[in-house]
């Protein structure tokens, strides 16, 4: 943009601000012939997200990239620890799983740009395999969710929104190094060319493991210091391009490939030597959306084809030497999901009504063999779904939304085809410009995973789908301060409850899955945000309890969780972040195993050393606390991290 055009834009902005503030008109008209003598101001980058349209009447939390990076995490799993309703843990198979408000990990639907990535066999998305370098924002919906997200969302929704060529700041190279010989590198190339934009990201993350806390007491299976068999490596490439103008509309194409390996640390009381090699993740999607119609009442259309597959090889060794000649067994697993969905959206059917409706068809499959000497077995399942959703503006202060979806599930060896009808209703009241009250209730279903149906030791082909009635009541208020008070202050409160029927549970890892009768959980969440000039504080508290039913559904879920985040920016070039997290006591794997509470503190200091260069230093678990997220699997001790980022 030339200086003359910048001057014209600045004049328009100043005129609008003056008019909005009731100020007097500008005393004179600027002479653009002398615009070269005017000061030039640079504006921050504007993030533009590509996402599926869903209404916002149900509470949700959006985390931007800057918030995700506050924890010095190398994957999305660690970054989501700051969400009050999220319980993130890494344990038995060294997978990072997330639970929302006590729901099991397989009940939480995880999407990338609206496409599901939950593997069909186990149903639990491993967030350690999602690199932060490709993520622009994350939407977390812990309560009743829009039917447009898809089936199997009985425990909430996490929608990961990836960068486009317009959402990033051009091209970026980022490098981080830390404890355990950790190295995290990524190179993102992006930009816009005429009617299309692109972004390609290359990344490589690897570590020799993590150091345990100095407070850790050695056991027969773990001697302390560096955690045994905890090394990993992830290398990959992700690409996304958007063509904005074609004869059939805009076209968005995404694709990626990741490969790597990781060790699986054993329970510190029961030694075992597992390693996962040959990890491959392929994904791709093509979305075609109609160009905005000339009439506001015309329905915009979109069609999406998507594919996602995970492959790995799990090897058990006889001892810690990990000698290839001393192997107990080698297991291969291939998961894949493919589908198509079509959606229509009419923004203004009338002055007060907006609607969207659609249909989808998804197939999940698995190929597995328990050992190289055994035969492969394959299973699959189909999900077909139609849905509709409407939002009504009753008056300027009230909005009502309702929707319904019908899903048919067709698996193997099932006498009857499973189906579910899931409605949702939400009400939003705006008593004032700074206050919002909401209430929502929904029924959600989750069909059994392929492992629950056909697992060698635990499968039960007679399982019924889980059914959950979910409700939430919340309010949010925002006020502005004067003088010493915060310049902005917001308070958010929510109460929720979940009543599950036919919960799919097994009491042990080798026990058969079965439908339990009923389980009820409930709780509350409270959040405060306060901001001053150059400083902000955020506090979040979550409470979850079991109202009725089997306590096994809340294994590893604390009754109390508190997170305090403080950001200080004393200078435009400097910033400091501190996060204090408290996790309350919780039920472990054994009936009498009550895991103790713990508190950790993370910190990060950033310095912009040049216009296009940024350096940062940080530490996780500063006080070197010894803790366990899951029974027998201690978390990392103090970790030091340093890195830099360069844009060009």
Image (tube, rainbow, N blue to C red):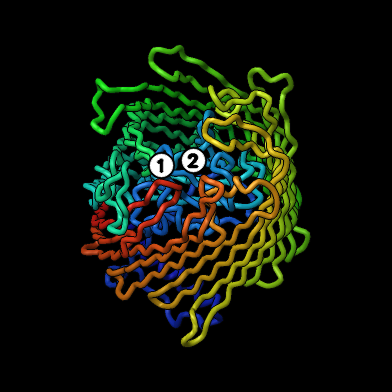
Residue 388 seen = no
- Image quadrant of residue 398? bottom right
- Image quadrant of residue 458? top right
Query: Front-most of 291 and 267?
Result: 267
Q: Is residue 73 above or below residue 384?
A: below
**How far is the residue under mark 1 from the one under mark 2?**
10 Å
Check contact, mark 1 vs mark 2: CB within 8 A.
yes
Residue 327 seen = yes
> How far from the left and from the top, in percent, is residue 220?
31, 43
Q: Is residue 257 above or below residue 172?
A: above
Mark 2: few/some/many CA within 10 Å (<14, 14-19, 20+): some
Q: Residue at x 27, y 44 (%)?
A: 209
Q: Residue at x 54, y 76 (%)?
A: 19
Query: Front-most of 609 and 375?
Result: 375
> How far from the left and from the top, in percent, is residue 135?
41, 47
Instruction: Name the residue that disc number 1 marks.
Output: 130
Query: Front-most of 547 and 621?
Result: 547
> How far from the left and from the top, in percent, is residue 611?
24, 62
- Image quadrant of residue 493? bottom right
Q: Which of pointers 1 and 2 indicates the residue nearer the eye?
A: 1
The answer to whether 388 appears left or right of 7 in the picture is right
The answer to whether 92 appears left or right of 24 in the picture is left
Q: Secondary structure at mark 1?
A: loop
Instruction: Name the residue that disc number 2 marks.
Output: 112
């Amino acid at each position: 943009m030339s200086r003359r055009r910048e001057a014209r834009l600045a004049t328009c902005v100043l005129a609008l601000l003056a008019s909005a503030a009731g100020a007097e008109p500008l005393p004179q008209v600027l002479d653009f012939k002398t615009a070269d003598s005017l000061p030039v101001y640079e504006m921050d980058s504007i993030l533009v997200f590509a996402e599926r349209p869903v209404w916002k009447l149900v509470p949700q939390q959006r985390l931007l990239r800057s918030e995700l990076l506050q924890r010095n995490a190398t994957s999305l799993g660690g970054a989501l620890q700051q969400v009050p309703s999220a319980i993130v843990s890494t344990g038995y198979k060294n997978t990072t799983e997330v639970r929302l408000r006590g729901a099991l990990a397989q009940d939480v639907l995880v999407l990338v740009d609206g496409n599901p990535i939950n593997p069909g066999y186990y149903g639990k998305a491993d967030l350690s395999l999602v690199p932060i370098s490709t993520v622009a924002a994350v939407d977390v919906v812990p309560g009743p969710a829009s039917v447009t997200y898809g089936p199997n969302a009985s425990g909430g929704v996490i929608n990961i929104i990836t960068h486009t060529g317009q959402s990033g700041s051009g091209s970026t190279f980022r490098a981080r190094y830390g404890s355990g010989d950790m190295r995290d590198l990524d190179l993102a190339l992006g930009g816009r060319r005429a009617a299309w934009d692109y972004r390609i990201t290359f990344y490589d993350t690897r570590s020799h493991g993590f150091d345990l806390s100095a407070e850790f007491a050695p056991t027969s299976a773990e001697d302390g210091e560096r955690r045994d068999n905890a090394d990993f490596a992830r290398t990959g490439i992700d690409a996304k391009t958007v063509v904005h103008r074609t004869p059939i509309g805009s076209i968005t194409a995404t694709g990626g490939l990741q490969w790597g390996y990781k060790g699986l640390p054993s329970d510190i009381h029961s030694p075992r030597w597992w390693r996962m090699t040959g990890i491959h993740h392929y994904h791709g999607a093509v979305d075609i959306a109609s160009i905005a119609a000339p009439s506001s009442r015309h329905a915009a259309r979109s069609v999406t084809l998507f594919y996602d597959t995970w492959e790995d090889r799990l090897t058990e060794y006889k001892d810690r030497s990990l000698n290839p000649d001393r192997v107990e067994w080698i297991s291969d697993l291939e998961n894949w999901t493919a589908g198509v969905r079509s959606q229509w959206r009419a923004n203004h059917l009338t002055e007060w009504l907006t609607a969207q409706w659609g249909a989808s068809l998804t197939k999940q499959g698995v190929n597995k063999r328990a050992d190289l000497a055994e035969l492969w077995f394959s299973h699959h399942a189909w999900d077909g779904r139609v849905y509709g959703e409407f939002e009504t503006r009753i008056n300027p202060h009230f909005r009502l939304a309702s929707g319904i979806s019908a899903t048919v599930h067709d698996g193997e060896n099932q006498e009857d085809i499973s189906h579910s009808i899931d409605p949702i209703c939400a009400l939003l009241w705006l008593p004032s410009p700074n206050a919002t009250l909401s209430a929502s209730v929904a029924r959600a279903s989750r069909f059994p995973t392929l492992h629950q149906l056909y697992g060698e030791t635990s499968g039960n082909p007679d399982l019924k789908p889980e059914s959950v009635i979910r409700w939430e009541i919340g309010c949010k208020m925002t006020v502005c301060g004067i003088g010493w008070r915060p310049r902005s202050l917001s308070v958010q409160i929510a109460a929720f409850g979940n009543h599950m029927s036919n919960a799919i549970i097994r009491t042990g890892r080798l026990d058969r899955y079965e439908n339990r009768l009923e389980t009820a959980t409930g709780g509350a969440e409270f959040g405060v945000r306060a901001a001053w000039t150059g400083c902000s504080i955020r506090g979040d508290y979550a409470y979850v309890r079991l109202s009725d039913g089997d306590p096994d559904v809340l294994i590893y879920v604390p009754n109390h969780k508190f997170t305090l985040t403080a950001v200080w920016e004393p200078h435009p070039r400097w910033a400091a972040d501190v996060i204090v997290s408290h996790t309350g006591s919780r039920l472990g794997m054994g009936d009498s195993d009550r895991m103790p509470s713990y508190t950790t503190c993370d910190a990060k200091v950033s310095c912009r050393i040049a216009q296009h260069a940024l350096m940062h230093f940080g530490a996780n678990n500063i006080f070197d606390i010894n803790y366990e997220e899951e029974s027998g699997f201690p978390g990392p001790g103090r970790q030091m991290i340093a890195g830099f980022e360069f844009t060009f």
